[in-house]
Image (tube, rainbow, N blue to C red):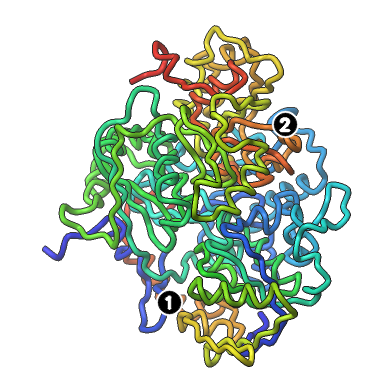
Amino acid sequence: MSHPKTIVEKIWDQHVVHEEEGKPNLLYIDLHLIHEVTSPQAFEGLRMAGRKVRRPDRTYATMDHNVPTIHRNIIKDEVSKKQMETLKTNCEEFGVRLADINHPDQGIVHVIGPELGLTQPGKTIVCGDSHTSTHGAFGALAFGIGTSEVEHVLATQSLWQAPPKTLQVNVDGVLGTGVTAKDLILAIIGKYGVRFGTGHVIEYTGEAVRNLSMEERMTVCNMSIEAGARAGLISPDATTIDYMRGKRYVPEGKDFDEAAEQWLALASDEGAEYDQTLTIHADEIEPQVTWGTNPSQCVPVGGRVPDPDSIEEDRDGIERAIEYMGLEANQSIESIPVEHVFIGSCTNSRLSDLRKAAEIVRGGRVHEGVRALVVPGSKSVKDAAEAEGLDTIFLTAGFEWRDAGCSMCLAMNDDIVPPGERCASTSNRNFEGRQGNGARTHLVSPEMAAAAALEGHFVDVRKYASTVGG
Amino acid sequence: MEPIKQHRGLVYPLDRSNVDTDQIIPKQFLKRIERQGFGQFLFYNWRFNEDGTLREDFSLNDPKYDGASVLVGGENFGCGSSREHAPWAIQDYGFKVVIAPSFADIFYNNCFKNGILPIQLPKPVVDQLMEKATKEKYEVKVDLEKQIIDDGDLEVSFDIQSYHKEMLLNGWDEIAVTLTYEDKIDQYEKQNKGVKTLGIS
Ligand code: SF4
């Protein structure tokens, strides 16, 4: 047998179309996901050059970034409307399948790929969206690309890519009660910063990662890009195989068994070498809340906003962040009031996220002065949640229950946090203005967001000990 | 794409780290379906007040930097969203070269597709450039062929992958280049026995 390999090396080797001295590899792309915001210029480029989509059958489009999550078919913003219409026309012209706004499969691109079984272990997957890393949860090599590369993949089903370096993030031990996958990834980024992954593909390993469900794994891999990584993935195991079974685009019967065998063989070999390894202890992690304007600026919920005077590195940046966020140095996190709560986004809008938030909310009441929104990640998540009555739990408590889309994660539709107002959000980016110009975002888990909605400020969700699962 | 061989231009220093693509171009401008015309929205929330007037506290609005074409930034420049609207805005505003101690991967890649030369230099060197450009009107000459930045006083060399260099020097249409390998792609597709996705042949 050749030397022990990481899953990244294995997938890479299987996808090299061409290699040549002094050039990156030409890498084959198995699946290309498309949405309305980063594709119009790519299709236009094809049209201008008289090119076709090489493999429409390996391309799948949806509408998510712009779509209204209420009054579905009234799109007031003419420019958004045009962008959606453009996607529709482009898909028709180039023969690409599209789950458009009223389609039963519509949803956030990183929610529907896995849900439909388009996302599979061992595939190379790209999308003009940085959170494509989500699909790495399945042991796929999935990464975000720019619009020129979208055009390149449409035309050639391939990309020039230099082999990435590998970075193992090993999480040993067990996550405590009330501590979620979101807290895990925030704590990792909090500890190592927003660029420790640059130039690398992260592979998450260790007991705590193995114990995560597929949906939790997606939450972790989703935020790899916030660590600067090109992609993040987790080797397939029994949890992966169980999830894949019965998905629409996955083979059945004997074919499935064969596929499962191939998928499991992709897992990193014992003794495989990584360019770097970091270790984190799961039992030290507590529920996290970001206080600043990038995801590494987070502390445990029992903590305080840092004091720039006591910090050497990037003092200006920290001061600027505290000012933008309207906070005080040393202020306790639990004393921060919230005006908006957003449960949604490709990080935390899947059925299990909504179930966990609903457990906290059940029987409670949204705090006065708080506007709380639940936006399921896809139409099918929404249907499933309604089938088990989650919508009623949220609505009774005073939450709004919306249709699927990116919504307040990036506020390209009408779901906007007004300037200076504060939002507890289950999304992945707390950048300046992300949820609206001047909006102040605090990233948290769905459980923590739900608890903040009820109390009107951040609270340690572990105080709801009877409802948070172990 | 317009080739870049040499470029001489005024330096604009943006002394902030982790400048993300949401700052470079806020999302309300991502709805356009064209590739041009994004320069007017560059750093929009930093450049403009709510009422559309210029913010005096943002350095790019200082007339001293009018016509700048070399942007010097901090660590992790271009992090966040993959939106190519970010390099489109930078390029359309008039920047041809971006220098930083480190770049986010997707942004770095996107630059080459749009005729922007991203140059990574050690932090102390970037700090030096930043300081000079903050003090006075400061011009540098960038020679891609020789991989050198020169301000008449200081001369520094930089690294760049040969493939990226070729691309900018020649102003290549990358798709046209790849299509010369079409037979290899055909061959790969014929041989590849990976797992099929139903409905996808
Ligand atoms: S939910 Fe947010 S992060 Fe995810 S794809 Fe949509 S806009 Fe991007």
**Whole-percent x, y for residue A161 in the image:** 43, 69
The N terminus of chain B, quarter of image: bottom right
- The mark closer to the camera, 2 or 1, is 2
From the viewer's side, name the closer residue of A429 and A279.
A279
Left or right side of A21 for B199: right
**Whole-percent x, y for residue A171 in the image:** 29, 41
Secondary structure at badge 2 equals loop
Left or right side of B101 for A372: right
Disc sitting over residue B183 in the figure: 1
Residue drawn 51% across the image and 44% down it:
A297
Which residue is labeled 2 in the image?
A72
The answer to whether residue A230 is seen in the rendering is yes
**Whole-percent x, y for residue A205 in the image:** 28, 45
Secondary structure at badge 1 equals helix
Outermost residue, front side: A309
Give above or below for B187 relative to A278: below
Residue drawn 39% across the image and 28% down it:
A179
The answer to whether residue B106 is seen in the rendering is no
Disc 2 and disc 1 on one polypeptide chain? no
Disc sitting over residue B93 in the figure: none
- Crowd tier of the residue under label 1, counting other residues whose Cα lies within 10 Å: few below 14, some 14–19, many 20 or above: few
Q: CA distance from mark 2 to mark 1?
A: 45 Å
**Whole-percent x, y for residue A295 in the image:** 52, 44
Chain letter for the residue marked with disc 2 in the picture = A
The C terminus of chain B, quarter of image: bottom left
- Crowd tier of the residue under label 2, counting other residues whose Cα lies within 10 Å: few below 14, some 14–19, many 20 or above: few
Residue drawn 64% across the image and 36% down it:
A327
Look at label 2 and name its amino acid.
Arg
